[in-house]
Image (cartoon, rainbow, N blue to C red):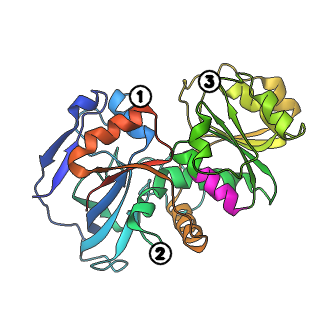
Amino acid sequence: MPLAYRLWPGKGLNTLKVESLPRRQLMPHEVRVAVRAASLNYRDLLICRGEYPAPSGRPIIPCSDGSGTVIETGSGVNTFAMGDSVVGSFFADWQDGLPTQEKIAISTGCDLDGWLTEEIILPSKALVSIPSGVSLTAAACAPCAGVTAWVSLVEIAKLTSGKIVLIQGTGGVSMWMAQLAKAHHLQVIFITSDSDKVAKFDKNVLGVINYHEHPDWSNEVLRLTNGHGADLVLEIGGNSTIRESLRAVAFAGHIAIVGGLSGWTYDRVEYLELITKFVTTHGIYVGSKRNLIDLLAFTAKNSIVPHISASFKFHDALSAFHEMEAGRHVGKIIIDIS
């Protein structure tokens, strides 16, 4: 019987336990995958804490993001075969196009059991073939953080070469955004509490601003850009950062709101900045299967390798969660299940 980790949403990390689960027969539309890698997202911690809408009446297998090898297909599946390398999309029902409530109703690692297991069963429509040149580990970093960055930059902001992207933090979405911005010939400014984190990875940035040294960091953004501001702001901080983001964004610029690390109540919005600068704000909730396919194709074409901060073995998965909780990582945290 395959091993899997399960936790009770809202009851803390101490409920994360490994169990042997019985193998069941596949439905005609399903695929069984031997999992090789899973990656953590901040959402996994929110589910543990009860700060994210998740089923409360049963334990779940966490991790929306993972990759592996097909080992069995249902009788009605003709899109995958034994041995195929696949990665899961975040939303099983959001295949393409604009989001709807129905398309985002079911997400992996929450409503559907996730990838922190030796074997996963998913509907075939929730899986994507991994293109040549992209490793299983790299693909496992893409479905949530990578797609969020891709949608923010490519699908929504549609920036042209030379434009400026302001990135908050150095987590999974942030480092994906930095790599995608570089591949699109955009200029990058980082906002961080630890300048050394960024220096380790990329010295070719327009600027790195330490928000402890510059609490009113929008002034530094404007100085670095000769008063222009950032054409796209990746807003991760939430209530404590939205005011500075609005002050730092360029005229007719974009703010992609993807997180709320300091709280989800945005009572520090300065509406005059929003109105008089013609700012467009977008709430980004990951993206579709098509977005994941496009991201992986771009990743392969441009030889992008996601930043991986730490890798943990399957038996030590709890340590991976503690690493995420500590906030020391730069990029993604991987759990190796091979």
Task: Residue at 53% x, 29% y: name it.
Answer: 261
Q: Is residue 284 found left or right of 56 in the rendered image?
A: right
Give the CA separation, mark 3 to mark 1. 16 Å
Q: Is residue 105 found left or right of 17 in the rendered image?
A: right
Q: Is residue 22 found left or right of 174 in the rendered image?
A: left
Is residue 193 or residue 12 the one in the foreground?
A: 193
Quarter of the picture containing the N terminus is bottom left
Q: On residue 131, which mark appears?
A: 2
Label 1 SS: loop
Point out residue 197 in the picture as x, y percentages from the top left corner. Answer: 56, 41
Give the mark, 3 or 1, whose residue is nearer the N terminus. 1
Residue where numbered disc 3 is placed: 239
Segment colored magenta? 176-184
Task: Residue at 41% x, 28% y: name it.
Answer: 51
Dominant SS of magenta comes to helix
Q: On residue 109, which mark appears?
A: none
Is residue 257 or residue 184 the one in the foreground?
A: 184
Give the CA separation, mark 2 to mark 3. 39 Å
Seen in the picture, residue 126 relative to 152 is either above or below; the reply is below
